[in-house]
Amino acid sequence: MLVIDKASGDKTVTLRVGESFQIRLPENPATGFRWRLQSDGSPALRLVEDAFQAAASGHGSGGSRNWTFLVDDPTDTVLRFELKRSWQPAAVDSFQIVVNAHN
């Protein structure tokens, strides 16, 4: 499975219908900052999983937010994410990737 990380932002990936891939972004929920999906890529993409994976044991440790998507439709689309606190309107970071889906 293709894993796309923060360094791959603002790039284009090409995938086939039926393939899955993962977006992995660094996050520390203990600070209140969480990555939030702003544009989900539908109908070309389907979100299969959204999970946090801690890098180390212990309360307050950081890790990564991981989203797994499945390509459903041969359409170009954009995934957008923002890093922000739920009670603050402004994002402190953003991430975007273009997905070129084909048969």
Image: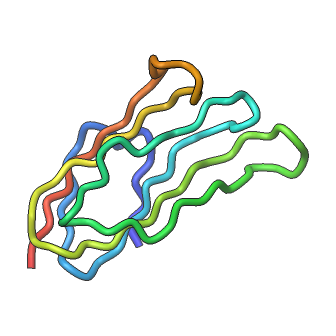
Where's the C terminus, which quadrant? bottom left
Q: Is residue 98 left or right of residue 79?
A: left
Q: Residue at x 68, y 46 (%)?
A: 63
> Residue 5 at what x, y percent from top left?
44, 47
Q: Nearer the viewer, residue 10 or 28?
A: 28
How many numbered discs, if any?
0
Where's the N terminus, which quadrant? bottom left
Q: Residue at x 19, y 66 (%)?
A: 44
Q: Within the image, what quadrant is residue 61 found in? A: top right
Q: Residue at x 61, y 48 (%)?
A: 64
Q: Is residue 42 left or right of residue 23?
A: left
Q: Within the image, what quadrant is residue 46 found in? A: bottom left
> Residue 18 at what x, y percent from top left?
25, 82
Q: Is residue 54 above or below residue 34?
A: below
> Residue 34 at what x, y percent from top left?
58, 37
In this view, the residue farthest toward the front is 87
> Residue 20 at what x, y percent from top left?
35, 73
Q: Is residue 103 above or below residue 54?
A: below
Q: How is the image coloured?
A: rainbow
Q: Nearer the viewer, residue 87 or 47?
A: 87
Q: Residue at x 62, y 30 (%)?
A: 33
Q: Is residue 93 left or right of residue 63?
A: left
Q: Is residue 76 left or right of residue 38?
A: left
Q: Is residue 84 above or below residue 46?
A: above
Q: Is residue 64 above or below residue 103?
A: above
